[in-house]
Image (tube, rainbow, N blue to C red):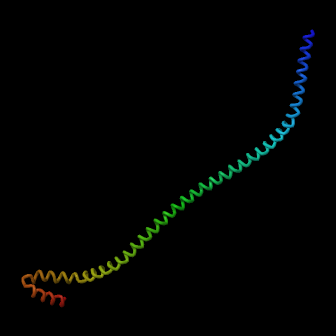
Amino acid sequence: LKSNVSVTIGDLASWCVAMEKYYRIDLEVRPKKAQLAIAQEKFAEVDAQLKLKEADLKVVEDKVNGLRADLKFQQDKKADLEAKVADCKAKLIRATQLINGLGGEKARWKASSESLTAIYNNLSGDVLISSGMIAYLGAFNSVLRDELAAKWVINC
């Protein structure tokens, strides 16, 4: 029994020593646990704020990306319009050159028209003189033919 009691007392003494160590360690750990709880609360608050700020940042980034896409679209549209303007300017220059060139043609066509009108007006007389020369003056020499043709022109 004595050995059994001393083992029991030894175990009880070990337990008391362990409880005393636990108490001393607990005195150090308890404030740290309280500080941990406070830090975790602050972390939760800051993390919540971070999540809100990240959501706000996502909204702003989406808006910036949308604006960038719109900028690219507008720049492409501007480049397309500038190309169309350059094409229209080139067409306008060619059209102006064509119109100016046709202006010279108008004068030439008008002169040709007046010349052809005069030829048309004289056509019947010219045909008459030509057929008369072929029919009646073919046997004569060229000097006599020229004199007779001049008299016919005066009389017609």
Name the image quarter holding residue 102: bottom left
Q: Nearer the viewer, residue 40 or 102?
A: 40
Q: Position of residue 21 (x, y in %)?
A: 87, 27
Q: Position of residue 130 (x, y in %)?
A: 15, 81
Q: Is residue 69 above or below residue 143?
A: above
| Residue at 57%, 59% in the rendered image | 74
Q: Position of residue 22 (x, y in %)?
A: 87, 28
If the image is split into quadrants, where does the C terminus sit? bottom left
Q: Is residue 135 above or below residue 69?
A: below
Q: Is residue 147 above or below residue 49?
A: below
Left or right, residue 73 beside residue 110: right
Q: Is residue 60 above or below residue 96?
A: above
| Residue at 49%, 66% in the rendered image | 85
Q: Position of residue 111 (x, y in %)?
A: 31, 81
| Residue at 57%, 56% in the rendered image | 72
Left or right, residue 106 beside residue 145: right
Name the image quarter holding residue 139: bottom left
